[in-house]
Amino acid sequence: MKFNLDFTTDYGQFYICDKNFLGQTDSENFWTDKAYDNKIAVENGILGIAIGNEEGIVKCEFEILVSRNLKVDFNDFDHIVEASLKIDSGFFQVLDCPNSEVQFQTEVENGEFRARIYSRNLALAFDENPQDSYLIQIWKEEFSEPIVLKRFSVI
């Protein structure tokens, strides 16, 4: 299943989470220096996704996959990161920041999921019309530590 999301957020981030997440987004363990570098923050049942533009514009494709996508196009994206997320409520949500307004919700089977976040056009995020965009893919998979598959660096 594929969905297109277009919304605004603040503080350069939005969230993907379990509907009844227990993690604290204001925890000192959420947006650590490493999380900022990796463009993803991890807490119990919630992931913080960093965006490039300061306008708070989020243009995002969201896909629920049957299994891990093994064909990653590293050339089309600037930054690619993965992290695990446990769903206990049966609902997966995308929330803005800081209001945590639901931008998208879908029913899923409870269990452990892996999320891969692709960021593109990060170098154009600060143009007059920001062009950064995001692709989120999730699939069922056992928990594993976050990993950066491709790191964006400003040249």
Image (tube, rainbow, N blue to C red):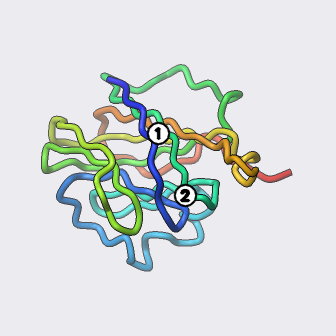
In terms of depth relative to the viewer, which is nearer, 17 or 124? Answer: 124
Q: Quadrant of residue 99?
A: bottom left
Q: Residues within 10 Å of mark 2 (few under 14, many from 20)?
A: some
Residue positioned 33% across, 48% down in the render? 103
Residue of label 1: 116
Identified by mark 1, the residue type is Arg
**Secondary-structure class at tag 2:** loop
Which label belongs to residue 56? 2
Q: Quadrant of residue 95?
A: bottom left
How far separated are the C-alphas under marks 2 and 1? 21 Å
Q: Is residue 47 above or below residue 117?
A: below
Name the spot of residue 89 as percent of width and height, x first.
13, 50
Residue positioned 42% across, 32% down in the render? 4
Q: Is residue 10 above or below residue 105?
A: below
Q: Residues within 10 Å of mark 1 (few under 14, many from 20)?
A: many
Seen from this angle, which residue lies furthest bottom? 28
Direction from residue 98 to residue 33 in the image, left or right: right
Identified by mark 2, the residue type is Gly
Residue positioned 42% across, 38% down in the render? 5
Name the spot of residue 50 as percent of width and height, x first.
54, 57
**Secondary-structure class at tag 1:** strand
